[in-house]
């Protein structure tokens, strides 16, 4: 089964806001986990997102399109990126999520994926 590991962090904790030494260590830790995922054959892809302030939100209500800058919800943590893994079960996906360095700075949500359509 495929799972999304969703990475949530506060703006102050994002890599671009970390001290250089902390950022380098964080990047090395993230690379190590990715390599471990690849060696295990469970890695299916990943993406990093820009900050929520760069978002544009689109809604259609009663036939009218409403476009707003920024995210809809005001939260302390925002979605910073994700990866997709293929695991036997939720327990295996949770074990991988615990290894992601984001869990030490923010949180990692594990969510099963389902096919579209």
Image: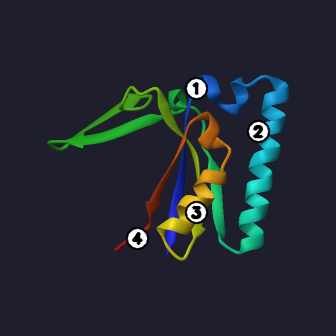
Q: CA distance from mark 2 to mark 3?
A: 20 Å
How many callouts does the rendering have?
4
Asked if the residue under mark 3 is in contact with the one under mark 4, i.e. CB atoms within 8 Å, the reply is: no
Secondary element at tag 1: helix
- Checking the image for residue 114, the label placed there is 4
Relative to 32, residue 25 above or below: above
Mark 3 → mark 1, Cα distance in angstroms? 23 Å
Residue 43 placement (x, y as % from top left): 67, 67
Specify the color scheme: rainbow
CA gap, disc 4 to disc 1?
Answer: 30 Å
Q: Residue furthest left?
A: 62
Q: Is residue 26 left or right of residue 62?
A: right
In the drawing, does residue 60 fall left or right of residue 107?
A: left
Indicate which disc residue 26 carries: 2
Q: Position of residue 54 (x, y in %)?
A: 54, 30
- Disc 2 or disc 4, which is closer to the eye? 2
User: Which of the two labelled residues, at mark 2 and mark 3, occupies the earlier sequence position?
Assistant: 2
Q: Earlier in the sequence, mark 2 or mark 4?
A: 2
What residue is disc 1 on?
11
Distance Cα–Cα, label 2 vs label 4: 31 Å
Residue position marked by numbered label 3 in the rendering: 84
Q: Answer yes or no: do the residues labelled 3 and 1 have beta carbons within 8 Å?
A: no
Q: CA distance from mark 4 to mark 3?
A: 12 Å
Using the rendered view, name the quadrant where residue 27 is placed. Answer: top right
């Amino acid at each position: 089964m495929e799972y999304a590991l969703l990475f949530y962090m506060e703006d102050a904790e994002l890599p671009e806001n970390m001290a250089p030494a902390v950022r380098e260590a964080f990047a090395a830790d993230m690379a190590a986990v990715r390599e471990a995922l690849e060696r295990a054959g469970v890695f299916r892809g990943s993406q990093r997102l820009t900050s929520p302030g760069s978002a544009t939100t689109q809604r259609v209500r009663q036939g009218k399109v409403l476009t707003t800058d920024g995210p809809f919800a005001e939260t302390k943590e925002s979605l910073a990126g994700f990866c997709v893994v293929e695991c036997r079960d939720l327990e295996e996906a949770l074990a991988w999520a615990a290894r992601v360095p984001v869990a030490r700075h923010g949180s990692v949500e594990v969510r099963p994926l389902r096919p579209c359509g």
